[in-house]
Amino acid sequence: MRILLATDAWPPQVNGVVRTLKQLVPELEKLGHAVTVLSPDLFPGIPCPFYPEIRLALGAGRRVGPMIEAAQPDAIHIVTEGPLGFAARRWCLANRRAFTTAFHTRFPEYLAARCLVPARFTYAILRRFHAPSRGIMVATESMRRALARHGFDNMRPWSRGVDPALFDPARRDETLPFARPMFLSVGRVALEKNLATFLRLDLPGSKVVVGEGPQLESLKRKFPAAHFLGRVENGSLARLYASADVFVFPSRTDTFGLVILEALASGLPVAAFPVPGPLDVIGESGAGVLDEDLGRAALAALDIPRAECRAHALRFTWTNCARQFVDGLSC
């Protein structure tokens, strides 16, 4: 098929949506599909409020239609609810073209935490955005149930994968300058990631945080004993995963948590709250500990065999992710 993806999330952004798309496109091409991506780098843009590294496309309303027509897609998938997503949706409705969408980010909870905007208002806008979609792709069953409670329907499963060659226990480095046990957290350093809960825990050894974001400087000042490494990618990030002793995932608002899979593939046990994302990825696998007491979970995770974590992560492949995505498309 000729598949068109309209997305407001694209490099140089660093987040789970971008990592998913960058893995998805080559996997789709391996399966014989031709992929066109409408992304922000094709347009002039302005910084997104609260997320300045995200560029919002300007002029998408005028240019997206001709770009879709030039691609002659068999299937159209709208990845995000931003300017490009709205422009593609508007063109599809005007031209009576079927399309699918995806729910990647819990913006209602993020805006409620940051701006005190009631979540029900944002959910109403998102319901309207997704209502004409032939199918809303969601990463987990827990997220499907959560969205159903907010009035969403016609949802389709679309899981995620991990690169086991990159995220590999063999990259472990015992010489890193962090006291053991080493508790690691990776992700955007922002309010919605709930990192302060992790940093307040009374744990032995050291706490290491990888990522950038608006809370970075304030958390550095508030928790001077923690190690903040900023942006780390690819092989260096894989080495940190493999070298840590427990991966602590304090977020309560992620729809999946791709970093959980990366940690597990590296042989790193996970400690998290029992919420959507961790519940679906970890579940009853024994590869992590889910507990409302995050400190207790982190200490208990120290006893999990690393081989069990790796074995569980290998069940999630990008090839299966791509095939499930194709199955969920509407032509």
Image: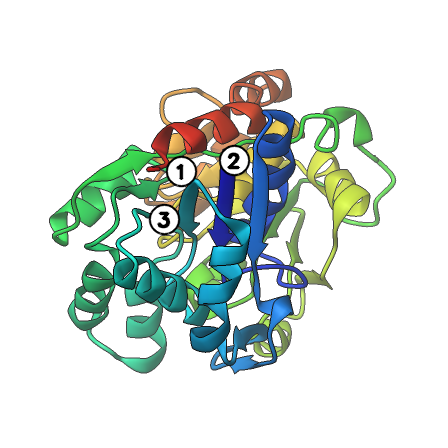
Q: Residue at x 39, y 34 (%)?
A: 158
Looking at the image, tell me whether mark 3 or mark 1 is earlier in sequence order: 3
Which is nearer the eye, 230 or 151? 151
Instruction: Give residue 64's position: percent from left, percent from top.
Output: 48, 67
Which quarter of the picture shows residue 128?
bottom left
From the image, state whether disc 3 or disc 1 is nearer to you: 3
State how far apart marks 2 and 3 are (Cα). 26 Å
Which quarter of the picture shows residue 266?
top right
Task: Identify residue type, mark 1.
Answer: Pro
What is the image's colouring?
rainbow
The residue pinned by badge 3 equals 102
- Mark 1 neighbour density, 10 Å: few (under 14) some (14–19) many (20 or more): many
Looking at the image, tell me whether mark 1 or mark 2 is earlier in sequence order: 2
The residue pinned by badge 2 equals 270
Label 1, secondary structure: give it: helix
Looking at the image, tell me whether mark 2 or mark 3 is earlier in sequence order: 3
Task: Identify residue type, mark 2.
Answer: Val
* Residue 185 visible: yes
Instruction: Give residue 236's position: percent from left, percent from top.
Output: 80, 46
- Mark 3 neighbour density, 10 Å: few (under 14) some (14–19) many (20 or more): many
Q: Residue at x 33, y 41 (%)?
A: 138
The residue pinned by badge 1 equals 278
